[in-house]
Image: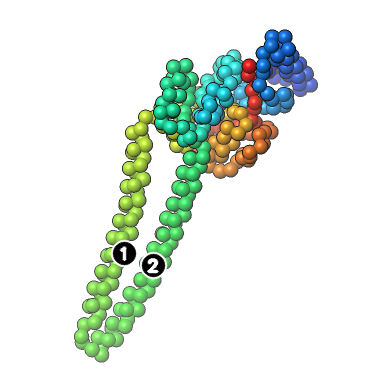
Amino acid sequence: PRRPAWKLGQPAEELETAERAAFLDWRRELADLEDNQRYILTPFEKNLEVWRQLWRVMERSQLLVQIVDARNPLLFRCVDLEKYASELRPPRPCMLIVNKADLLSEAQRVAWAKYFSANKIEFVFWSAAKAQHELEEEARLDRLEEAAGASRAHTASFVGEGKGAANGSGGVEDDADHSGDGGGDDDADDGGDGLGDDGADGDGQSTRCGIASATDAADAADSCVRVLSREELMAMLLKRCPPGPPAADGTTLRTIGLVGYPNVGKSSTVNVMVSAKKTSVSATPGKTKHFQTLRVPDEPGILLCDCPGLVFPSV
């Protein structure tokens, strides 16, 4: 359904009446398709309040993103929504985030990429679950590194205290015996320190080299069929989204509207984008009731506008 034309300063009661009348006309048109023209419609959202959330998300956004399930993208893509976005002023560009793409083989992603490209559909392959796992793994490695750093600091402090004690005892032995035991202690200390430093440096360097090698290999893959990482997805959205109107402080903010059916992974995608749990994830459809705006911590120029899950009608 389309939101009826409105203007600033219009009374809220008048606007609400116009929206309800337009929505009822849309419902009558769908009923006519079923009753008189013998079309079969899929179940769809019949609550006007949910559609109002969609209208506001579309009006606030500079880029409209549909999140679809990779196992059947066309089932979860609403073509009429893209047409509606093109009717707005200014028109909103649209793109697909094909979520759960890690469940597809590379050959399947190649086939879908050819289809989307042939039909001039902007798309990216994505997996919220895979990206969440990568974030958790990165956090785990950071915790291990912090723990290892604290352990090395504690060991260095203990070794330093041991050296001081050894030097003191060596002086007493020199007075009593000129056998030169202190020299032997110095050699042992030097050898121990050298082995410890080499071992730590070697481990750290090998870990960093492994990460760098994996990154280089990923960059060399075909970006059209590769499942993007979080950083790559944010860069793509930032590139595709036009700048919004300047704010009061002179900065420009790009607002990205996120729309999708229930249970396609939209809330999980939002959580990964903001790197925190901001929207509840549930197996029950319709968990999110109202649209919400979320800032991306490491991308201050991006504002996410998350629409409640919507079931669109189809014939």
Image location (x, y in percent) of residue 242: 50, 23
Marks 1 and 2, the one that precedes in the sequence: 2
Query: Pointer 1: what residue?
Result: 196
Q: The disc labelled 2 sits on which kind of residue? A: Thr
Above or below 305: residue 6: above
Across and down, in percent, residue 79 comes to 57, 18
Res 147 quadrant in image: bottom left
Looking at the picture, tell me which residue is in the foreground, 102 or 275.
102
Q: How is the image coloured?
A: rainbow
Q: Is residue 43 left or right of residue 78?
A: right
- Residue 31, horizontal then vertical, whole percent: 73, 14
The residue indicated by pointer 2 is 155
The relative height of residue 109 versus residue 139 in the rendered view (above or below) is above
Would residue 312 be seen by someone viewing this image from the given angle?
yes
Which labelled disc corresponds to residue 217?
none
- Residue depicted at x 34% and y 49%: 208
Q: Residue at 60% x, 19% y: name it.
A: 81
Please state, as top left, top right, bottom left or bottom right, where the N terminus lies in the image. Answer: top right
In the shown orientation, is residue 214 left or right of residue 232? left
Quadrant location of residue 19? top right
Q: Is residue 26 above or below residue 157?
A: above
Q: As drawn, is 280 to the left or to the right of 233?
A: right
Secondary structure under badge 1? Answer: helix
Amino acid bearing label 1: Gly
Q: Secondary structure at mark 2?
A: helix
| Contact, mark 1 vs mark 2 (Cβ under 8 Å) | yes
Residue most toward the top? 37
Residue 246: tell me if it is visible: no
Q: Quick one: label 2, few (<14), some, or many (20+) residues within 10 Å?
A: few
Q: CA distance from mark 1 to mark 2?
A: 10 Å
Q: Position of residue 209 (x, y in %)?
A: 32, 47
In depth, the one of 6 and 97 nearer the eye is 97
